[in-house]
Image: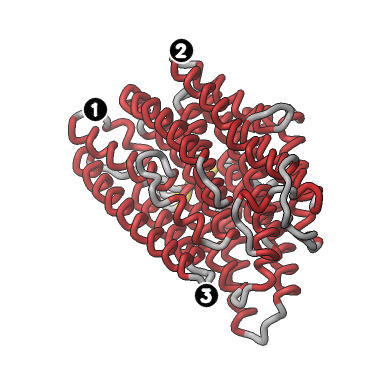
Amino acid sequence: MLNDFLILMKSEMIITVIIFLLLFLKIGKGMNNGSLLSLIQVLLLLNFIAGFFCNKTGTLFGDMFSTTPLIAFQKNILNLGVYLISLVCAGWLRKSEHLPEFFILMLSALLGLFLLISSGNLLIFFLALELSTIPIAAMANFDLSKKVSSEAAMKMILSSAFSSGILLFGISLIYGATGTISFGDLSQHLDGSPLQILAFVFLFTAFAFKLSIVPFHLWTADVYEGSPIAATAFLSVISKGAIAFIFISALYKVFQPMEDLWYKMIVVLAIATMVIGNLFALRQQNIKRFLAFSSIAQVGFILVGISSNDVNGLSSVIYFVLIYTFSNLAAFGVASAITDQTGKENIDDYKGLYKTNPFLGWIMALALFSLAGIPPTAGFFGKLFLLTAGANQGNYWFIIIAGLNMVISLYYYLRVIRAIFMDKNENPIEKIKLNVSVKLGMIICGAGIVLVGLLSWIYDYILSLI
């Protein structure tokens, strides 16, 4: 029994051990930031490697917790993302006065996301969601000397509280209408009654808040802009990736009897999310707000893949989240390096970046090409699979609109690339000194952007897990 517990909850146990280790180091004599960050990076790398071993199928606590090799792979994508954040944001992290506290918060949020993905009923789902949300709000407020950081945390808390209230109300209605909160039993009790539809709409709305689906996206840009880039990267990549995983699982398994309803909702919201995200991204000057609206548009494409309601939809979403992890963290890594050493965050400041920092210029270009879906980057294959999966429903107008939004997105992504490579700047960004960790993280992200798309066995491996 103990062996089963340790194996099935392997990911959660490792994260818990790292959290306690950081607590003991904080209480003790402590270490300088450079040594502590190096230790944390090694631990996160070992955690990522451990994610490939001893992955079994099983349940615990009366089916409240469940895991499969596919769930273990999803968690390991998040492990990879956290490890990359510790690398690409090393410049800011080394200067932080509260480095162990930041990683304790980040890993606590990651632990909540792990429990969220493995949740087997709505109770553990809600508790895990709160465990992941509260530390993120504290991370958003980590730049204590900046007023915008406190504002970001406040907006994060208020929006999270609102979405949690909606989620709790939806859970109460679900329980009242079906008499159960177990994911395994819910689908058998869903008959499409008005009360059940209302409850589902509330639950869907809570997911929409967390994923920044239009019109529930209004908090996103302000929180991204005010938070430290390490927190913004976690919120943009790790949190959204985990919510996408549990969202597609809930729709495909739990709310499958309501497919006609949620398919129509997804089509409408996906179009709105892509259009609004793209239109607002066109006019952004701050790089973090730019990436915020870019991420909103990317969520619209994820919804296209989810709409397929088949194996191709599930595999394409997981594959795209992996690609999105490399692409977005590469972009945030470049933004972090520049902001950390120069304080510049506007896109106009990036003019002429290639002349003084060719390495950063190429990494940012690779990231934006991938986010735009330009071949031969992995982003092209990711969006191709999402659109192909969405086309399985035969709604070709939906796919055409999504394709047109890809064309629109080319403009604002290429606008940044033009500024980096072609525009002149009388006061260009000086030569940025990158430490080994930052450069390693960017190289890994760049390699991932290229290789994940070209190595077809990665997608085949995801299909085999399903």
Q: Position of residue 383 (x, y in %)?
A: 59, 28
Local packing at callout 3 (Cα closer than 10 Å; few below 14, some 14-19, many 20+) is few
Q: Quadrant location of the N terminus?
A: bottom right
Q: Quick check: can you spot residue 53?
A: no
Separation (CA) of disc 2 from disc 1: 24 Å
Work out whether 247 lies above or below 86: above
Helix, strand or loop for disc 2: loop
Q: Please, which residue is most extreme toward the bottom here?
A: 29
Res. 192 mark:
1
Separation (CA) of disc 3 from disc 2: 53 Å
Which of the 4 image quadrants contains residue 272?
A: top left
Res. 394 mark:
2
Q: Position of residue 386 (x, y in %)?
A: 56, 26
Proximity of marks 3 and 2: CB atoms separated by less than 8 Å = no
Q: Which residue is mark 3?
A: 145
Separation (CA) of disc 1 from disc 3: 51 Å
Q: Residue at x 53, y 42 (%)?
A: 295
Which of the 4 image quadrants contains residue 161?
A: bottom left
Q: Identify which amino acid the numbered label 3 is placed on.
A: Ser
Helix, strand or loop for disc 1: loop
Local packing at callout 2 (Cα closer than 10 Å; few below 14, some 14-19, many 20+) is few
Q: Residue at x 70, y 63 (%)?
A: 90
Q: Quick check: can you spot residue 149?
A: yes
Q: Identify which amino acid the numbered label 1 is placed on.
A: Gly
